Amino acid sequence: MGRLDHNWIGSFFNGYVLVFPDDTEWQVEAKISEKCDYLVAEEYPHVLEKDLSESQAVYHCRQTAGPEVGQEGIMKIRMQVPTKYPESMDPEERAKEAVTKLGPWTANEINNLTDLNEKGCSVTPKLLTWDRFQQSSEMLVPGGYVAILVMEKLPGVSLDSSFWKYDREKRDNVRAAFRIALTELFGNDASHSDKRLANIHYDEKNDKWYV
């Protein structure tokens, strides 16, 4: 197992109730997925001074305090993790990698969702709330960033496991709905960079795509 295969976040946030700047509280529920990305500094010369490794875990979540208690959502936790695996057991050594500025992919996601929400884009999820903080001494990269996003839970399903099970006619109908979604997205001066089926949501009842 290498650094990109390792579930760095693991069970760390399981069961947490997280408090956000808008005074809402959200319970972390079942984990959906986790992945790790490695960003090479020379590919991001204007935003990175050194290589950066970031893990992203996605969870179901539920509002436990705020104006809509019981509301379901999707929580995404993006945090800096060590660039080496296995990591050093010395927290002071791991802290030498700390980056306080959000990684470029994390910053882009927050900025893009905020912009698209303000424009009223109907094919992207609403960013309900978000927060950031620095990792404590017992975490993976002490002083490194953590960003937590809570987004609306979209209707329908992701197509990672179902699309190719559809017959040809249904797949063509799905593709037609996807073209409509992309047209709206492009019309808002945005694009869809991660084209994996797991990141594309289809609401069959309303024949609508979300990206």
Image (cartoon, rainbow, N blue to C red):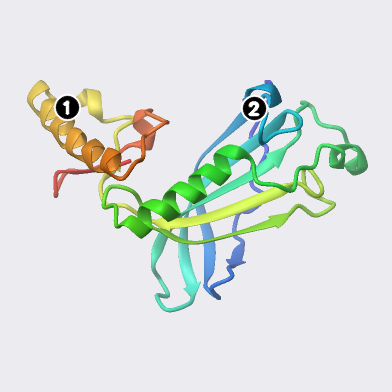
Residue drawn at x 32%, y 37% is: 200
The kind of secondary structure element at disc 1 is loop
In the image shown, does 64 or 79 lie closer to the viewer?
A: 79
Residue drawn at x 12%, y 24% is: 167
The mark found on residue 137 in the picture is none
Residue drawn at x 41%, y 31% is: 193
Return the residue at label 1: 166
Identify the image quadrant of residue 91: top right
Residue 85 is left or right of residue 67, and the answer is: right
In this orientation, does residue 50 appear?
yes
Residue drawn at x 59%, y 66% is: 17
The kind of secondary structure element at disc 2 is strand
Q: Nearer the viewer, mark 1 or mark 2?
A: 2
Mark 1 vs mark 2, CA separation in Å = 35 Å
Q: Position of residue 115 (x, y in %)?
A: 41, 53
In the image shown, does 133 or 184 lie closer to the viewer?
A: 184
Residue 124 is left or right of residue 175, and the answer is: right
Q: Residue furthest bottom?
A: 67
Query: How many marks do you count on the picture?
Result: 2
Q: Position of residue 211 (x, y in %)?
A: 33, 41
Q: Is residue 172 above or below residue 9?
A: above
Q: Is residue 127 above or below residue 82?
A: below
The mark found on residue 38 in the picture is 2
Position of the N terminus by quadrant: top right
Q: Position of residue 46 (x, y in %)?
A: 66, 33
Amino acid bearing label 2: Tyr
Q: Earlier in the sequence, mark 1 or mark 2?
A: 2
Mark 1 neighbour class, 10 Å CA radius: few under 14, some 14 to 19, many 20 or more: few
